[in-house]
Image: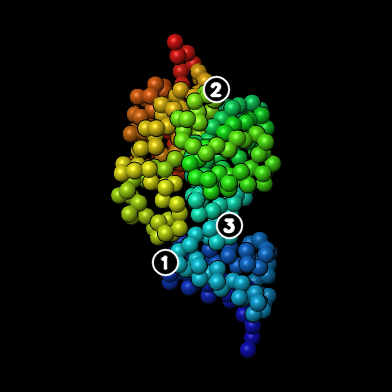
Amino acid sequence: MARQTVRDILGKSEEYLSGKGVDSPRLSAQLLAAFALGMDRMRLFLDLDRPLGDAELDLIRPLIARRGRGEPVAMIVGEKEFFCRPFAVCSETLTPRPETELLIEIVLERVGRAAAIRFADLGAGSGVLAVTVACELAGAAGVAVDVSPGALAAARANAERHGVASRIEFVLGDFGDVLAGGGYDVILTNPPYVSEAEYAGLSREVRDFESKSALVPGASGLEAYRSIAPAAYAALSPGGFVAAEIGWTQGEAVSGIFGAAGFESIRVRKDLAGLDRVVLADKPASTA
């Protein structure tokens, strides 16, 4: 009997995953096969006709089975790319999403790569925002704040991996207590913003495998912003700004929350899909 090739196992895995209704079955099959075989996708494509041994098939099949049960690829392989860098993820963090990269793009637009800024990342999770800002801006230093010890451990490990741990302080606690010292130029946050009603309608890949506490702050989905806005206003230096990721229906409501806290020049930025994604708000240069 002829042995299965890489092409064969990819085709069968894609068919299996399609039948299970998971997102991106072809890409999932490719990423998991490449991970199991210890190669990148380009090498996988170059080896499509290579026969696979039983030991190699035994590495691939359990990963495909896990994906078929809805477990995200990032959780299976233990990392996800963000802003062209790999980041470790764990059960206490969200899987980084491409739309969150807009927060980094806004910082680079506003301050430039040569800026020496002090920043805060609120609800840091795996640390993608804090670590990426520190990587992109050699003069940046700041704090990464989260209420989850596991998330902070992942964030610290990612900072060490990318060589910026010395410029980031990792703090366990809530926003108001941590930011009491003030003096920040930029505050970034991707807080929980999914309402209880929205959570009930999320895919099983999110509901069953991602941290609910990192997704849902309360019934309305706006609770975190009500805590963040006054704390951020008090902590920012005059002329500083906050950039907060939002759900695509929340632009008006979150803008109102930041306006009530004293921010000005409040605007909503859209992501590449044309959906409202970030509320950007400035603290007045003069607060007298």
| Residue drawn 53% across the image and 75% down it | 12
- The type of residue carrying mark 3 is Gly
Of labels 2 and 3, earlier in sequence is 3
Judging by the rendered image, the residue that carries numbered circle 2 is 183
Secondary structure category for the residue under label 1 = loop
Q: In front: mark 3 or mark 1?
A: 3
Give the residue number, with chain letter if any, for mark 3: 78
Residue bearing mark 1 = 21
Position of 13 with respect to 266 (left or right) is right
Question: Is 203 on the left-hand or right-hand side of 219?
Answer: right
- Mark 2 against mark 1, which lies toward the viewer? 2
Judge whether residue 108 can be spotted in this image: no
**Badge 2: few (under 14), some or many (20 or more) residues near its Cα, within 10 Å?**
some
Tell me, yes or no, whether the two marked residues, 2 and 1, touch with CB atoms within 8 Å.
no
Residue in the foreground of this view, choosing between 56 and 109:
56
Q: Dividing the image into 4 quarters, which one contains the N terminus?
A: bottom right
Report the residue at 35% width, 51% height from top: 199
Q: Where does the image place residue 71, in percent across and percent down from the top left?
A: 48, 62
Quarter-wise, where is residue 185 in the image? top right
Does residue 155 appear in this view? yes
Q: Secondary structure at mark 3?
A: loop
| Place of residue 120 in the rendered image (x, y in percent of width and height, measured from the top left) | 54, 32
Q: Earlier in the sequence, mark 2 or mark 1?
A: 1
Asked where in the image residue 217 lies, by quadrant, the reply is: top left
